[in-house]
Amino acid sequence: MSLRIPTPGAFAHAVLASAGLVCGFAVGDWPAATACFALALAAAVLRARRAESEATEFRRRSEHDPLTGVGNYRKLHERLAAATAHDPQKFALLTLDVDRFKEINETHGHLEGDRLLQEVGRVLAENVRGTDVVARQGGDEFSVLMPDSTEEGAEMLARRIEEALAMIKVADAAPVRASIGVALYPQDGATPDDLLEKADLDLRTTKERRRAASIAVPEVASVGAWSSTPTPSQV
């Protein structure tokens, strides 16, 4: 049984206000009328606060991914739309997906897959700036919107993310890696769709080159494709 005290509704507010009028003008009991009016005012304040709290919670839920706690697809697109429409400053969009996620999910179960996604969300949230926006687009794909960021800033963040992901413990004990793509505003696109497409193209290029080269460890890569031909020391 819930012990939550219900907030007075509109009906209770109306009853208290009416009682105050009756006590004051019909009966002449102004102390009682004052008490009724005070209760009516308190009820109105409680209703307003509850409505504001519910609106805030609804907004929070509508913008956040329930599994990982980071932003969701809607939040990312809203912020991208706002940045491309009103912000003349350069920014970077970083998109990543987790290598081998499907394999881990199918081999070790969905609970392990969900735990991995939660860890990836945590890593991203802990390594970005306060002004950056982290969002899960769906599945194992995440994005980071980096306001007022340069190519160098995006490259530094990608390297930091790679290093932090490798520390995550998974069921098969293999290091966690992610393929990363980057788009820069405005040179790579003027709309959210253009930027997302460019970042996704970078991501897929990275994944294809890594698969072709059979690279076994994370490497420092260029922003263009976030991977390169292995050097002799990496072979």
Image (tube, rainbow, N blue to C red):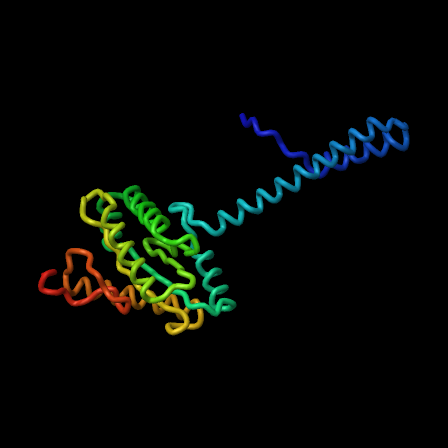
Residue depicted at 25% across the width and 45% down the height: 168
Q: Is residue 16 left or right of residue 75?
A: right
Which of the two residues, 67 or 148, is positioned nearer the viewer here? 148
Residue 22 in picture, x, y percent from top left: 86, 32
Based on the displayed image, in which of its 4 quarters is residue 154 positioned? bottom left
**Above or below 123: residue 74:** below
Residue at image coords 70%, 35%: 43
Horizontal and vertical percent for residue 104?
A: 23, 48
Left or right placement of residue 46 versus residue 77 in this view: right
Q: In which quarter of the image is residue 158?
A: bottom left
Instruction: Report x, y in % for residue 232.
Output: 9, 64
- Residue 105 point in image, percent of width and height: 26, 48
Image quadrant containing the C terminus: bottom left
Q: In this view, does 35 lie above or below 196?
A: above
Q: Residue at x 68, y 34 (%)?
A: 8
Q: Which quadrant holds the N terminus?
A: top right
Q: Residue at x 87, y 26 (%)?
A: 29
Q: Which residue is at the front of the view, 3 or 160?
A: 160
Is residue 155 or residue 174 the one in the foreground? 155
With respect to residue 217, does 24 lie above or below? above
Q: Is residue 172 left or right of residue 97?
A: left
